[in-house]
Image (spheres, rainbow, N blue to C red):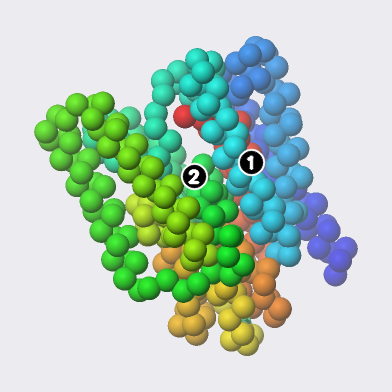
Amino acid sequence: MKIMKSFTHWRASLATVFLTGGMLCVVQVMVDRPMLLVERFFPGFGWLEIIALALYAGFMTPKIMNPATSVRWRTILWLTFSILFFGQLFLGLLGLENFLMSGRLHLPIPALIIAGPVFRGENYFMPILFSATLLFIGPAWCSYFCYLGGWDFLASKHQKYSKPMPGWRHLIRAGVLFLVIATALFFRKNESPVLFVLWFAALYGLGGLVVMFVFSRRQGVMVHCSTYCPVGLVANIFGKVSPFRIRINDSCSGCHRCIKVCRYDALKPDDISRGRPGLSCTLCGDCTGTCNTSSINYSFPGLSGRMARTLFVVIVVSFHAVSIGVARI
Ligand code: SF4
Ligand code: SF4
Ligand code: SF4
């Protein structure tokens, strides 16, 4: 059994190395302005960065595949991305424009993925990128990729276990999404000055930090991500296009241990009885490591739970490693 497990991990690592390397090679060859940092500073040496990122992805794969270690390594992986992302933004602010995506600055607020194009009526790069991740890995944008969500996760870990959220948070969440889109449309229709709109967006972003610091820490739940940020709801709804799901099988003893570790408020006793988490599940996988009977796991049509998890991790870790190489603001 142990040998089989190591073999599966080894094959998955290899798959991640090739998938990551393949995607980065396409970026290196096809995109005119170099995307990889090493290529930007030392033309011709971007290939070394591709090799390093592919090996990093291969190293991370078994750590995330193992339910017992995945929470720890997902945290490391997610925050690593965020620190690199904000580190590059900081260097960009200092005037080193090689650390910026296009040489122009944008506000690092996830809500602008939706509100930005609605306001400008152009520049759909981020919505397209976001939609592509939804297609492949569903709402896992909000548990592996978002540069801000990792900090909400960290804030929620201030409490050992999550506390239940009131049912009306779903109404607030839908209301915030509506207001963000309506406000962007209002600003666009009235041709509001860009500087005023930027200040408005910055204040909204600061409000999010307050929500994290006050409410997520107190509740042990990612209140910012599951209530305040509109992108989370969009990811949850449209993430259903991906076939990956979390499912609870009949061997569940109803111990409810998994409920306490879900930081997205996606598991309630009713959800356990129904055999699936609620809408706000982001496929983070943290619940799978707490179940003594292995009753809760990833699912994918036609695959066993173990294979579904393997496939999910190979895709998610490869996308993560590619993001480290190319995602910046
Ligand atoms: S809900 Fe918003 S802030 Fe949270 S992880 Fe998703 S996009 Fe990021
Ligand atoms: S931890 Fe496992 S056994 Fe306990 S409620 Fe959750 S799925 Fe069921
Ligand atoms: S139900 Fe499990 S996989 Fe879904 S968000 Fe909660 S802990 Fe993560």
Q: Which is nearer the eye, 146 or 11?
A: 146
305 on left or right of 96:
right
Q: Position of residue 69 (x, y in %)?
A: 73, 60
Q: Residues within 10 Å of mark 1 (few under 14, many from 20)?
A: some
Q: Quadrant of the N terminus?
A: bottom right
Whereabouts is ligand 2, in terms of quadrant? bottom right
Q: Which mark is residue 292?
A: none
Q: Which is nearer the eye, 246 or 146?
A: 146
Amino acid carrying label 1: it is Thr
Quadrant of res 153: bottom right
Q: Position of residue 268 (x, y in %)?
A: 48, 78
As helix, strand or loop, the secondary structure at mark 1 comes to helix
As helix, strand or loop, the secondary structure at mark 2 comes to loop
Amino acid carrying label 2: it is Leu
- As drawn, 250 above or below 29: below
Q: Position of residue 186 (x, y in %)?
A: 15, 40
160 on left or right of 111:
right
| The residue at label 2 has a CB less than 8 Å from ligand 1 | yes
Quadrant of res 214: bottom left
Residue at image mark 2: 148
- As drawn, 204 above or below 273: above
Quick check: can you spot residue 241? no
Residue at 51% in and 27% down:
89
Residue at image mark 1: 80
Quadrant of res 19: top right
Cα separation between marks 1 and 2 = 12 Å
- As drawn, 56 above or below 142: above
Q: Which is nearer the eye, 25 or 125?
A: 125
- As drawn, 79 above or below 170: above
